């Protein structure tokens, strides 16, 4: 089955700096890669996603890049703000009966004011 | 439009007790999922459903049962709770790929 690894597990940045979180996946058939943000005591919320026919996608301060050959994808947050502090999860999925997601272990991002 | 809701928010059980977690969605989604979240392990899929009346096993199904009698509801049952089932449980639903999550249920088994 699919295996998704996520690094780093914790990341501390100064407000205004950029943050990068990286994920690798094992199944070359995976074709959908979402990123979720989870605030304390809440459920994960989708912040951006990318499909395998696209190499990069951007939405304001966040962007995701995908390298299908190397089987890795990354989340980039620019001009970080204290409200970006949360746990971020990457995931991978391929078209199957349940469109199931396999999640990475998560990254705790701390943005220091 | 409430999205995905979960009942209850918190629950404490004794070993051997049973309980049912309820997930409801008002987005008319076909797919529904139950995950558990443990520290340092991300989210792991317990069971899922691709439509009313159907269920299937995920990555960690042992000790759990599910039912999807109505399209909008997905129930997760623990017949005989064990301390290893202490976790935060999340329900999600989707129309296609994108999954929308509920707020979670924190379950403690003593």
Image: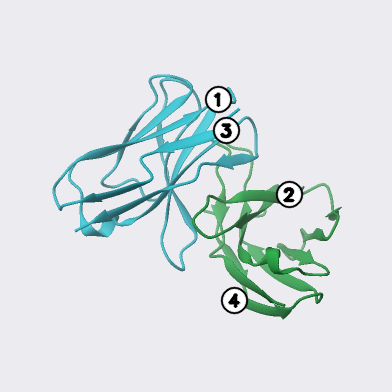
Chain colours: A green, B cyan
Report the residue at 49% width, 45% height from top. Answer: B103
* Mark 1 and mark 4 on one chain: no
Q: Could you tell which of marks 2 and 4 lies nearer the N-terminus?
A: 4
**Which element type, helix, strand or loop, lies under badge 2?**
strand
Both labels 2 and 4 in a single chain: yes
> Residue B79: x, y in percent?
20, 40
* Residue B102 seen in the current view: yes
**CA separation, marks 3 and 4?**
30 Å
Residue on which the image places disc 2: A49
Secondary structure of residue under mark 3: loop
Residue density around tag 2, few if under 14, some if 14–19, many if 20 or more, within 10 Å: many
Chain of the residue that carries numbered disc 1 in the rendered image = B
Circle 4 is placed at which residue position?
A: A10
Q: Nearer the viewer, mark 1 or mark 2?
A: 1
Of badges 1 and 4, nearer the viewer stands: 1
Quadrant of image for the C terminus of chain B: bottom left
Q: Quadrant of the N terminus of chain B?
A: top right
Q: Do marks 3 and 2 share a chain?
A: no
Left or right: B24 in relation to A54: left
Mark 1 vs mark 4, CA separation in Å: 35 Å
Q: On the image, numbered disc 1 is attached to which residue?
A: B26
């Amino acid at each position: 089955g699919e295996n998704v690894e996520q690094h780093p597990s914790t990341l501390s940045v100064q407000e205004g700096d950029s943050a990068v979180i990286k994920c690798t996946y094992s199944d070359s058939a995976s074709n959908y890669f979402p990123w979720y943000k989870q605030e304390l005591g809440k459920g994960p919320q989708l912040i951006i996603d990318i499909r395998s026919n696209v190499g990069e996608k951007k939405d304001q301060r966040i962007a995701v890049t995908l390298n299908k050959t190397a089987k890795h994808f990354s989340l980039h947050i620019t001009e970080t703000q204290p409200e970006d502090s949360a746990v971020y999860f990457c995931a991978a999925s391929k078209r199957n009966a349940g469109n199931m997601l396999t999640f990475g272990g998560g990254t705790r991002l701390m943005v220091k004011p | 439009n409430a999205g995905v809701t979960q009942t209850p928010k918190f629950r404490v059980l004794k070993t051997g007790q049973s309980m049912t977690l309820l997930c409801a969605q008002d987005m008319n989604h076909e797919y529904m999922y139950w995950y558990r979240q443990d520290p340092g392990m991300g989210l792991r899929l317990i069971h899922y459903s691709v439509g009313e009346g159907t269920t299937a096993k995920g990555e960690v199904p042992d000790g759990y049962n599910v039912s999807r009698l109505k399209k909008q509801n997905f129930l997760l049952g623990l017949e005989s709770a064990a301390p290893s089932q202490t976790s935060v449980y999340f329900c999600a639903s989707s129309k296609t790929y994108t999954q929308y999550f509920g707020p979670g249920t924190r379950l403690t088994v003593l």
